[in-house]
Image (tube, helix red, strand yellow):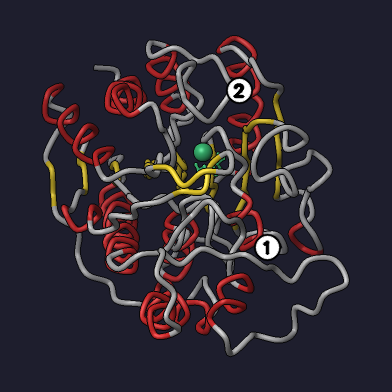
Amino acid sequence: MLTFHSEDTKKRQAKTELHAGELVAPFECPERVDIVIDRVRKVGLGEIRSPDAYGLDPVLAVHDRRYIEFLENACDDWAAAGFKGEPIPSIWPTRRLRDDVIPANIDGRIGYYALAAETSLCLGTFAAAQASKDIALSALDHVMRTGEPAFGLCRPPGHHAAVDQFGGYCFFNNAAIAAQHALNNGMKKVAILDIDFHHGNGTQDIFYERDDVLFLSLHGDPRDEFPYFLGFADETGRGKGEGFNVNYPLPSGTDYATWASTLDDAIQRIAAYQAEILIVSLGVDTFENDPISSFKLKSEDYIDCGRRLKALGIPTTFLLEGGYAVEEIGINTVNVLTGFEGT
Ligand SMILES: NCCCNCCCCCS
Ligand SMILES: [Zn+2]
């Protein structure tokens, strides 16, 4: 299987994450890229290719222009305001506050565009996010061109990024950008399967009223897990998107047997939808030792996961999302890919 990779994905070198009331080193660290690409090489998964540069148009097809402009300038605006630490939001347009005003003050504007406070911004974030979406687009184009599967070693991840929101370590929604690119280039029906531990709230937000993208997500029950405020089973789409959004919230402690039978239901839905292409938001924070998650999948389970996806027989693009047990992220991610290839 072909892998798309770029060292530019490591340009985001944030120093802080707000976690349990402390500023800690971010769980979503650049080393994740090195460990995955080392594993790709070690198992001989296949050729490793640099991405093409697609510019911002595919991003603007999915995200709000003012949001992109905010992201591009946020660090400079923050420094110009005389703030010393990394840009972190501290106020949001929550209940009975207005969200039709975009503050001129960066201290307010960052909250307008932020989903959550754990994701600091920093210089290099915008460049890394650009490299990450170029990887996703390159992988998608390869799959569309050849029908062969491809792996996009995306970093930062994307599935929490909504039309005009960053957070959950995400800035550009790589999977959504790739799906829209597929639809702009001849595809009629795309399925996005999000198997990251966390609900893909951003991807759901982007396609919620659409029937040309079927979005399915298996994830920790939002009653107990981030992002808490989206990802419930009763969110099934709106308008012509009704029935094209499928959430599978699962309890803490879910093991592979339960998870895999849920996956089988999602696979049947994708088959019934007759998707022409499948994009897998491949997070491996479902792993039993993940520091911020609570499922119990074991490394060998990811091989079987890949096998089950292969059985769908649809051209598939795998895009890396989460996975914070850094030592094992390579084995767990590549196990899905080798399982898919049957090697
Ligand atoms: N401070 C621990 C909670 C982390 N909240 C964000 C989780 C983002 C996962 C991305 S896959
Ligand atoms: Zn996650």
Q: Amino acid at mark 2?
A: Asp
> Residue 285's x, y, as percent?
47, 30
Tell me what residue is drawn at x 63 percent, y 33 percent: 219
Q: Residue 281 or 311: which is nearer the viewer? A: 281
Going from N to C along the chain, the mark reached first, 1 or 2, is 1
Q: Indicate whether 26 appears above or below 117.
A: above
- Answer few, some or many: residues within 10 Å of disc 1's Cα (few below 14, many 20 plus, some between 14 and 19): some
Q: Which residue is mark 1?
A: 210
Which residue lies under the disc numbered 2? 264
Q: Is residue 260 visible?
A: yes
Q: Is residue 253 above or below residue 105?
A: above
* Coordinates of residue 177 in the picture (x, y in percent): 45, 63
Q: Nearer the viewer, residue 67 or 102?
A: 102
Most foreground residue, 288 or 255: 288
Q: What quarter of the picture does the N terminus occupy?
A: top left
Q: Left or right of 34: which side holds 149?
A: right
Identity of the amino acid at label 1?
Arg
Q: Which of the 4 image quarters holds residue 129?
A: bottom left
The answer to whether residue 315 of the structure is visible from this angle is no
Residue 340 placement, left or right of 6: right
Picture coordinates of residue 31, whole percent (x, y): 24, 39
